[in-house]
Image: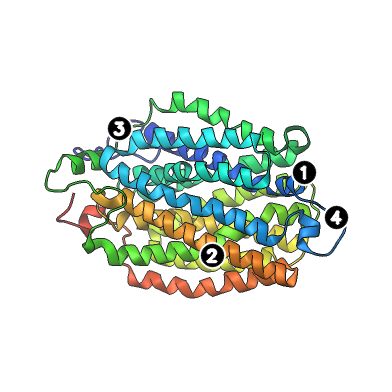
Amino acid sequence: MGDELLTGDLGLRSWRDPSIVALALMAFASGFGQGGAIAALGDVAKHFGHVVHGTTLADQAGLSGTVLGVGLAVLRLASLGSLPLAGLADRLGRRSLLLVTCSVGLVFTILAAASPGYWWLVVIFALGRPPLSATNALAQVSAAESTDFRNRAKAVALIAAGYGVGTGLTAVIHGLAKSTLGFRGLFLLAVVPLGSIVFIRGRLVETGRFAVAAAAARHPMPVFGAVGRAYRWRLLIVASLAFAVGVVSGPANSFVFVYAQNVLKMSGDETAAMVSVAAIFGLVGLLLGRVLADRLGRRPTGALAMTAMALTGTLAYSGSRHALLVGYELGVLAAATLAPAAGALANELFPTGVRASVAGWVVVASVAGATAGLVAFGAIADVGDRFAIGGAVTFLPVVLATGLFALLPETKGREPEDLWPDTA
């Protein structure tokens, strides 16, 4: 359909429209900026730590599971700063905030290349996390607002794909060229997506839904994450689900490379191949999630995918290379399946005037869950000197949280305006 508008006043577009593709590219840049810290964690731990022949996690990885977990938790907690940025997007607009947050976040990624120590690296990356997290959240909000119910899950899937490719590419590059680039060279490569923003910005447009809501004097734009009383019960449920997902995704994604390279002694080529294959599983998951979200529904798709994430995460850290490979690939499939359903549901449940603020709160909840998961996973793994125990204790209880989907209305085949007819 190209630039053809699907409806009049709201300016709704096809998920294949260049403006949606531009949002996916911004999500890609956000993922590339954030992914380097995780992809290079094993290299970072060896460089700033002390690897010896021993049986403890600190001996094998260079830094203890607790130190790594706390450092990663600090990075996650830093994303809390994305809340006021997302709130500003409900007042100033999605497009302008996207351009600023993405650019600033990538600058900090580049500066992290000069880190003289582990905690310096953590602090510099932490400064870049809020704008990069806000970029990804606002890209999803903009994609959801720019499409109708027939295109929304597809558009959200495209944004998730952009982010996933960005983070995955850092892992592939590091795996294949870590002896040449090192972690510092990897971080410096963020200059490429930073420069590309100059070309992407021409395709970015303000969403029609925001323009309509901003023009309605009776619907003042909230600031700094303010969400009206009428929306708070739904927000609490959605945030609780995001917290539960974060408990799994935080440690499952953040420890995988240090576990693969420093504990299981997998080579850079092997981890690059693992991530490359995961790209196929991720694509299949996004396609599956899009179809299930539109046909089976947002809620059942989300519940099934969350359950699969907990089980595959437990499998991945159970102790062998084969378990890691199978668990990691299926975990990527499960997370990708969740993305279209969860992204569409979270945006459809709230009106335009608070949608970006809600996205900010969802990031906060996800950060809190990931932080709790990272600290618990690292500490439990240290006690038993085994990642398997940390995985089982941290991930499996999350299955119980899938029951929260039953407390939300199904939004399949409905527009946000249908759920909040008296709001913009």
Q: Position of residue 101 (x, y in %)?
A: 42, 37
Q: Residue 184: horizontal and vertical position, in percent?
A: 68, 35
Which numbered mark, 1 or 2, is in the foreground of this view? 2
* Spatial CA span between label 1 and label 2: 32 Å
Report how far apart the C-alphas of labels 3 and 4 lie in the structure.
Answer: 61 Å
Give amino acid for label 1: Asp
Crowding around mark 2 (Cα neighbors within 10 Å: few <14, some 14 to 19, many 20+) is many
Q: Give the CA separation, mark 1 to mark 3.
A: 44 Å
- Which residue is painted at 34% across and 66% down in the image? 236
Q: Which residue is mark 1?
A: 269
Q: Place residue 190 in its image quadrant.
A: top right
Q: Amino acid at mark 2?
A: Ala
State the separation of the CA atoms marked 2 and 4.
29 Å
First in sequence, mark 1 or 2: give its number: 1
| Residue 49 seen | yes
Report helix, strand or loop for mark 4.
Answer: loop
Residue under label 3, please give it: 4
Q: Which one is earlier in the sequence, the residue at label 1 or at label 4? A: 4
Counting other residues with Cα less than 10 Å from the Cα at mark 3, is it few (<14), some (14-19), or many (20 or more)?
few
Whole-angstrom CA distance, mark 2 to mark 3, is: 45 Å
Q: 10 Å neighbourhood of mark 1: few (<14), some, or many (≥20)?
A: some
* Position above or below: 387 against 2: below
Give the mark, 2 or 3, whose residue is nearer the N terminus: 3
Marks 1 and 2 close (CB-CB < 8 Å): no
Which residue has dot 4 on it?
52
Q: In the visual, does 112 lie left or right of 26?
A: right
Q: Where is mark 2, residue-wise?
A: 372
Between marks 1 and 4 in the image, the one whose residue lies nearer the viewer? 4
